[in-house]
Image (cartoon, grey):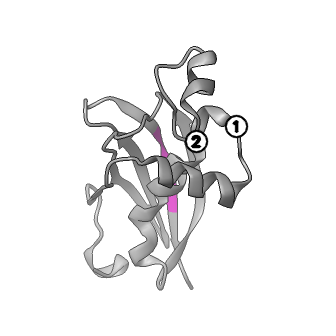
Amino acid sequence: MKIANDFEVGTQLEITLPPVSRLDLIKYAGASGDFNPIHTIDEDAAKAGLPGIIAHGMWTMGNLSKLFTPYFEEGFLEDYSVAFKGMVFLNDEITLQSSLVSIQNDRYYFDVLAINQNEEIVVKGSATLKRYQ
């Protein structure tokens, strides 16, 4: 799919991730340097009053940008902003979604969502994909 040829207002993109694993979160902790134990150690999550370990918010945000990686030969994410609306737990199945809301010259404005298997929004935001000149 090419941005210029196939994108129009209303275009939807969607990816469902495999269930969140402890290994995913351990790898992300190492890559990001965020070693807060509520993300990897059950006992520490319980001490913090959580029902289980939670994914790093930035892990979810980073995955959400995967919606746009097929188009990086033609453009790049010029702006990306999200609000964290809920927690992501081990074994959650997260569906990443975007909807194209407007096109202005070489910029494509999307609403983005990450939704868990219970249809709860865990991340909500916007992204601007800019075509290379």
Q: Is residue 100 left or right of residue 45?
A: left
Image quarter of the C terminus:
bottom right
Quadrant where the N terminus is found in the figure:
bottom left
| Residue placed under numbered mark 1 in the picture | 36
> Which residue occupies the foreground of this view, 7 or 91?
91
Q: Which structural element holds mark 1?
A: loop
- The residue at which mark 2 appears reads as 56
Residue 23, which numbered label?
none
Front-most of residues 125 and 41: 41
Q: Are marks 2 and 1 in contact (CB under 8 Å)?
A: yes
Residue range corresponding to the magenta coloring: 124-128
The quarter of the picture where residue 39 lies is top right
**Above or below for 10 versus 6:** above
Which x, y percent locates residue 72?
48, 78
Return the x and y of residue 19 as percentages of the image width and height.
32, 48
The reply to whether the magenta stretch includes residue 12 is: no
Lower sequence index among marks 2 and 1: 1
